Image (cartoon, rainbow, N blue to C red):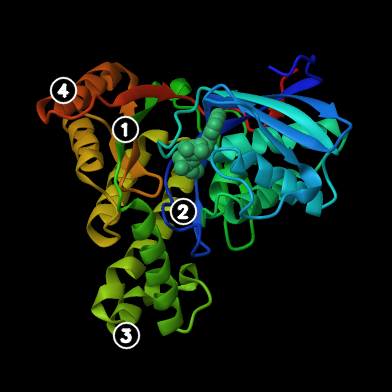
Amino acid sequence: MFGTACAGVWSAPGRVNLIGEHTDYNGGSVLPLALPRRTWAAAAPRADGLLRLHSADAPGEPAELAVARLVPGSVRGWAAYPAGVAWALRRAGYGPGGADVHVETDVPLGAGLSSSAALELAVALALTGLAGQEADRRELALLARDAEHAFPGVPCGIMDQTAAACCITGHVLHLRTRDLALRQVPFDPVAHGLRLLVVDTRAVHALRDGAYAARRAGCEAGARALGLRLLADLAPSQLDGALGELEPSLRPLVRHVVTEEVRVGRVVSRLEAGDPRSVGELLTAGHASLRDDFAVSCAELDLAVSAACRAGALGARMTGGGFGGSAVVLTEEAAAAGVAREVEAAFATGGRRPPRVFAVTPGDGARRDL
Ligand code: ADP
Ligand code: MG
């Protein structure tokens, strides 16, 4: 692409959140795992301060930007993600003067599997790697989050970048977003005769971004009305009393956040007790809460979950922000093929675009590959 050999290849994974949805901006817990699908960045340093960016998954000429002149709002399109990372790194004293970067991915883009954070962390590792710097993983995640806020302008939480930076094989990452405490929790579905399936519904609803902002504002209003800094500060034992103090439209939002936090805690306990099978019912209960209380599901996600459960899955839920994107399904290995078939058949009967169904195992976070 650039007529020079690369100095190295770095990569970072997409992620799927096992449970803990819409909790990350409320100070609550999330439980993502890294997908075995990744974004790779091959990079070489440049002495002239230019950042040249090319993606196999974005048609067109490479973007060419002067690192020292990057400011929020100055870059359009996909290049805003890696340019934002270069900007955030530079402000924190990291990164080379300039670089040529080529990226490729097998994470589906825009499917709720966090191709954006995979791209950010692959580039962050590449740019610090080129400069011979070793940055703390959590700091890199925070810088990538700042980059996504400032450059493409997406008001995301901290889960996606932390998952891409910090996940390890065979584990889910228990991230407490209030203080960024993290714990690796063993989760090896295959060793237990289980399969974790991702269903990419390939649906994206126009409501998505507006609904995210509205739910987030609703949660903040709920916390304010209850005199809390963060909604996740509300103890489950105080939930009923608190609901009575809130205006009706905020009640289901608060109920979702508080009950979801309880479900995350139960999933962690069951995984640590070596009982991943029993996690299924908590996934399905989480879906009901997102559908009925938080109201962020949609026909495609409900269809994927109901078809999977009908076919004998242990449990299933939408994952990610909602209004499209992906669902996650936990099933016995022996039932996995039948579950996938039932989900595909349900979409075909409804005349919908065929979903992509694939099995995942918890993979590695960001790393240097070459
Ligand atoms: P998700 O993170 O769930 O995949 P987002 O909307 O947050 O969805 O991010 C998707 C966007 O990120 C794409 O539209 C594109 O702009 C950018 N992106 C992610 N990965 C790549 C890539 N490998 N090449 C080019 N652009 C990418
Ligand atoms: Mg994203």
Query: Do tag 2 and tag 4 residues touch (Cβ < 8 Å)?
Result: no
Residue at the limit of the structure toward the left, as seen here: 349
Residue 33 appears anywhere in the view: no
Provide the residue designation for mark 4: 345
Quarter of the image where one finds residue 150? bottom right
Q: Earlier in the sequence, mark 1 or mark 3?
A: 1
Which marked residue is nearer to the observer: mark 2 or mark 3? 3
Query: Do tag 2 and tag 3 residues touch (Cβ < 8 Å)?
Result: no
Which marked residue is nearer to the observer: mark 1 or mark 4? 1
For the residue labelled by badge 3, is the local secondary structure a helix, a strand or a loop? helix
Provide the residue designation for mark 1: 202
For the residue labelled by badge 4, is the local secondary structure a helix, a strand or a loop? helix
Residue 73: image location, x then y, percent: 61, 54
Residue drawn at x 19%, y 37% is 303
Q: Amino acid at mark 2?
A: Gly
Residue drawn at x 41%, y 62% is 213
Which marked residue is nearer to the observer: mark 4 or mark 3? 4
Residue 278: image location, x then y, percent: 35, 39
Q: Label 3 crowding class (10 Å Cα cut-off): few <14, some 14-19, many 20+?
A: few
Query: Do tag 4 and tag 3 residues touch (Cβ < 8 Å)?
Result: no
Provide the residue designation for mark 2: 265
Q: Amino acid at mark 4?
A: Ala
Q: Label 1 crowding class (10 Å Cα cut-off): few <14, some 14-19, many 20+?
A: many
- Marks 1/2: CA distance? 30 Å
Q: Earlier in the sequence, mark 2 or mark 4?
A: 2
Q: Amino acid at mark 1?
A: Arg
Which quadrant of the figure contains the N terminus? top right
